[in-house]
Image (spheres, rainbow, N blue to C red):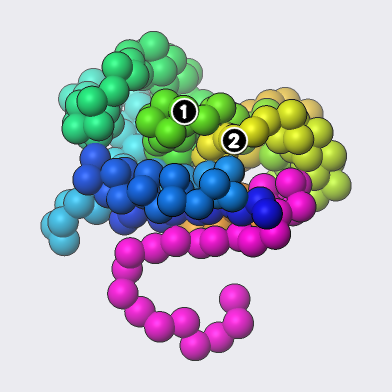
Amino acid sequence: MVKVVKFGGSSLADAGQFKKVKSIITSDAARRFCVPSAPGKRFSTDIKVTDMLYGCYALAKAEKNFTAELEAIKARYNEIIEGLGLSTCLDDEFDTIAENFKAKAGDDYAASRGEFLNGIIMADYLGYTFVDAAKYIFFDDNGVFMADETHEALSAYLSTLENAVIPGFYGSYKSSGKVKTFSRGGSDITGSIVARAISADIYENWTDVSGVLIADP
């Protein structure tokens, strides 16, 4: 039995939520592959990290100073890291993000960093291998998802791993390697892509938001 588990932003908003997620994953040895979203709101008036990234990059595009805004995002992640008692350091990643923002790497790149960074933390916390989705999930030059090429590459690599964390929401243009995101909610799509790649028995899409699903997804 092999399961893929995807967790939304509200389920990974802070260290306390990460701890809940780990308890869910470790309660079942079949849950070997995890797809995380970016941190969501910690409270009703909070701002999702993805929205913080969009705002930060908008300043970069306008050639305005975005240092304070990027530091605020870094503080969100450091709060999670400290709350989990990890030694993970994202300084180099944030230096790279700052340089790419200055070089105007694109809105998709900016938005994808939320999942990318959360994936690094989650992999460290679980002791799983981190897999950068940009290296295995592909789009053509028109932005159309390349299902067969993605399946071949991702399946080949994941088959070599016992456990892995694959960030949701993004991949890359196969020809250039430039980051390309799915539409909002795209982490759900990543979860299904990963489930297909490893021939998972079950794909679990977890959320802590109250509600009732009344239609076949």
| Image-based side of 158 in relation to 100, left or right | right
- Dot 2 amino acid type: Asn
- Mark 1 residue element: loop
Sequence-wise, the earlier of marks 1 and 2 is: 1
Picture layout, residue 20 above or below residue 111: below
Residue 163: mark in rendering: 2
Instruction: Tell whether label 2 touches label 1 (CB within 8 Å).
Output: yes
Residue appearing at x 32%, y 68% in the figure: 209
* Residue 194, horizontal then vertical, whole percent: 67, 48
Residue appearing at x 76%, y 35% in the figure: 159
- Mark 2 residue element: loop
Residue 127: mark in rendering: 1
* Residue 211, horizontal then vertical, whole percent: 35, 79
Residue appearing at x 22%, y 45% in the figure: 16
Q: CA distance from mark 1 to mark 2?
A: 8 Å
Residue appearing at x 23%, y 25% in the figure: 85
Q: Give the magenta-colored segment's residue range.
A: 193-217
